[in-house]
Image (cartoon, helix red, strand yellow):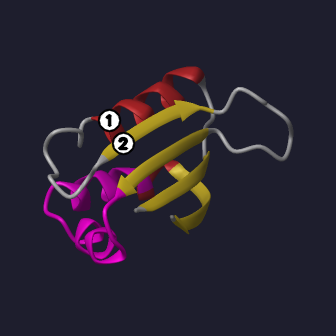
Amino acid sequence: MVKHIVMYKLKEPTEINKQALKEKFLSMKGKIDLLVDIQSGVDEIKSDRSFDVVLVCEFKSMEDLEKYRVHPVHLPVMEYVKSVVEKSHSVDYQY
């Protein structure tokens, strides 16, 4: 299994924008069969160094993660993400 975690810092970190990004991620649930699980939430720590929204995806393999990155449902979501995100940081765990 592979856990793909991405943390996002928004250009305009309002609660409405955080919720919109979270919902955009969750809109992929059930539409991309490569995903074992997908979760998205707003960062509750709210420190100066924290990110605004966290995305956690689980896959059966790294190959599935690579296919997800170019999946036709994922690509328009990423276009939206690019328009609202200032920076991001990702980590992949294999277990």
Left or right for 22, reference 6:
left
The residue drawn where x is 55% and y is 65% is 93
Secondary structure of the residue carrying tag 1 is helix
Q: Which range of residues does the magenta coloring cover?
A: 59-81
Q: Position of residue 3 (x, y in %)?
A: 47, 58
Characterize the local packing of mark 2: few (<14), some (14-19) or many (20 or more) Cα atoms within 10 angstroms: some
- Left or right? Give the position of 24 relative to 9: left
Q: Residue at position x 33%, y 43% from top?
A: 37
What is the number of the mark on residue 38? Answer: 2
**Residue 38 figure quarter:** top left
Question: In front: mark 1 or mark 2?
Answer: 2
Q: Is residue 70 inside the magenta stretch?
A: yes
Front in this rendered view, residue 90 or 58: 58
- Which residue lies under the disc numbered 1? 26
Q: Quadrant of residue 82?
A: bottom left
Note whether 51 is above or below 89 in the view shown.
above
Label 1, residues with CA under 10 Å away: few <14, some 14-19, many ≥20: some
Tell me the number on the disc at residue 87.
none
Task: Tell me which residue sits at (35%, 30%) in the image.
Answer: 23
Residue 78, x across and y down, in percent: 34, 58
- SS state under label 2: strand
Q: Amino acid at mark 2?
A: Ile
Taking the image as shown, residue 18 lies to the left or right of residue 21, namely right
Q: Could you say where residue 87 lies in the image, as x and y percent from the top left?
A: 62, 59
Vertical arrangement, residue 26 with respect to residue 15, above or below: below
